[in-house]
Image (tube, grey):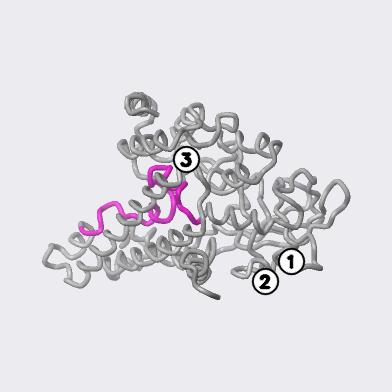
């Protein structure tokens, strides 16, 4: 697109966002106000749905997706301009969740036309919430050892087994699931990728209560769940390839960037005040902040800025192409940043950072303590740090096994 057309697009985008982004959607995300699709878990802020409706009508919940699938078909240059303008007004994402960040991009690449037409427009509108059926009690980092079995019954599969650490399964409308369809071949070759409704007979979920008092994870159980053959994504027994592709979308973090850096772990752990101001608040003065702590705070802020600049450069380089193995670098760096930042907040607050409940702690102190207890899971979910390092070594650096 020529430069004068891009400038016109920027001006039109700026004018539209200024007129249509509600005031509360220009503030920091508050827990409970997220919109992740579906209708089983509602945002506590009604303006979130006004924002979703307006952005979905423009195709800007998934701006680079084709128009026929609910997107706006934006070019790389237009997409970057939209990101700039969203960040300019500090806009929240209109829509989050696994639909727009994981299964949607995967269906665009690997799904049939019927699957795309059935699911993608609904995802773009926020009509559906999705969950991921990957990990099992005996198959976590060694995911290919999964045992949930889909028996071929002619025109449908009968699925039996269980999944664990299924985020949001109790609120999800649909699941994308890795299942075993052939037990007589090497483990990576007998896996298929299925989609099915969480309201299907035989599907049940049970929340897993964690140390921090919350339960984002569930166990999911499948007892003779009937899945139509048309819900198979890709070819039979070749689901491992589809499943790995989806993980690359998850690990890239590019969906968070497309949402103007308002979703994901880095946003959730950000305190109300910048860390430097927070340190001065608890220390009483600038001179009260211990020198080694000051250095660590600066290093952490540099890491964050470098991370987001690298993400933005990656968006500009790959445009609409699918992310590759290098996404494991984003996943690894983000997980370490989150743990380091929460440890810094704990050091800054001292004993006030260990509040679980009670009037002697404010809401942020209690919230961040619980996030600190949860932080270890970030280095495990979506593939552990050890797995990411192996991928980086083999697929990015080309090192031998």
At x 18%, y 61%, the residue is 280
Residue 356 makes an appearance in the image: no
The secondary structure type at the circle numbered 3 is loop
The image shows residue 138 at horizontal and vertical percentages of: 67, 71
Where are the magenta residues, as a range? 251-276
Q: Give the residue pinned by disc 1.
A: 147
Give the position of the N terminus as an image quadrant. Answer: top left
Q: Residue at x 29, y 70 (%)?
A: 351
Observer-nearest of 243 and 265:
243
Are the two marked residues, 3 and 1, in contact with CB atoms closer than 8 angstroms? no
- In what element is the residue under mark 2? loop
Look at the numbered discs 1 and 2 and tell me whether their residues touch, using CB distance below 8 Å.
Answer: yes
- In this figure, which residue is indicated by the disc labeled 3? 44
In this orientation, which residue lies closer to the viewer: 310 or 133? 310
State which quadrant residue 335 falls in.
Answer: bottom left
Marks 3 and 1, how far apart at CA: 39 Å
At horizontal 67% and vertical 66% (from top left) the residue drawn is: 144
| Numbered disc in front, either 3 or 1 | 1
- Using a 10 Å C-alpha cutoff, classify the residue at mark 1 as few (fewer than 14 neighbours), some (14 to 19) or many (20 or more): many
Query: Is residue 300 part of the magenta span, yes or no?
Result: no
Kindly report the distance in space between the C-alpha atoms of the residues bearing marks 1 and 2. Answer: 8 Å
Q: Earlier in the sequence, mark 2 or mark 3?
A: 3
Residue 40, given in percent of the width and then of the height, sits at 60, 42
For mark 2, what is the residue?
Answer: 138
């Amino acid at each position: 697109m020529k430069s004068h057309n891009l400038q016109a697009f920027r001006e039109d985008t700026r004018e539209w966002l200024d007129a249509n982004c509600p005031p509360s959607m220009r503030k920091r995300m508050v827990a409970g106000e997220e919109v992740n699709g579906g209708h089983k878990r509602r945002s506590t802020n009604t303006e979130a749905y006004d924002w979703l409706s307006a952005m979905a009508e423009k195709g800007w919940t998934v701006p680079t997706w084709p128009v026929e699938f609910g997107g706006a078909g934006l070019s790389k240059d237009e997409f970057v301009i939209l990101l700039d303008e969203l960040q300019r007004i500090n806009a929240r994402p209109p829509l989050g969740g696994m639909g727009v960040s994981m299964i949607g991009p995967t269906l665009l690449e690997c799904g049939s036309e019927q699957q795309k037409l059935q699911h993608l427009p609904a995802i773009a509108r926020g009509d559906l919430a999705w969950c991921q059926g990957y990990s099992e009690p005996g198959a976590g980092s060694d995911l290919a050892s999964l045992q949930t079995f889909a028996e071929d019954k002619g025109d449908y599969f009968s699925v039996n087994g269980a999944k664990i650490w299924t985020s949001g399964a109790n609120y999800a409308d649909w699941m994308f699931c890795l299942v075993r369809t052939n037990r007589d071949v090497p483990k990576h070759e007998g896996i298929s990728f299925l989609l099915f409704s969480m309201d299907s007979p035989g599907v049940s979920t049970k929340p897993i209560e964690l140390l921090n008092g919350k339960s984002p994870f569930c166990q999911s159980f499948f007892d003779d769940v009937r899945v139509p053959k048309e819900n198979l994504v890709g070819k039979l027994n070749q689901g491992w390839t589809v499943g790995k592709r989806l993980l690359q979308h998850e690990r890239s973090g590019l969906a968070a960037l497309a949402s103007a850096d308002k979703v994901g772990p880095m946003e959730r752990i950000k305190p109300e005040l910048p860390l430097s101001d927070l340190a001065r608040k608890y220390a009483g003065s600038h001179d009260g902040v211990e020198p080694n702590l000051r250095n660590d705070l600066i290093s952490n802020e540099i890491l964050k800025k470098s991370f987001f600049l690298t993400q933005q450069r990656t968006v500009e380089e790959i445009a609409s192409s699918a992310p590759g193995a290098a996404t494991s670098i984003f996943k690894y760096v983000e997980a370490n940043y989150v743990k380091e930042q929460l440890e810094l907040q704990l050091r800054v607050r001292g004993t006030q950072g260990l509040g679980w409940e009670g009037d002697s702690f404010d809401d942020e102190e209690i919230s961040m303590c619980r996030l600190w207890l949860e932080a270890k899971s970030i280095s495990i979910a979506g593939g552990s740090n050890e797995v990411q390092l192996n991928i980086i070594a083999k697929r990015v650096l080309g090192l031998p096994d």
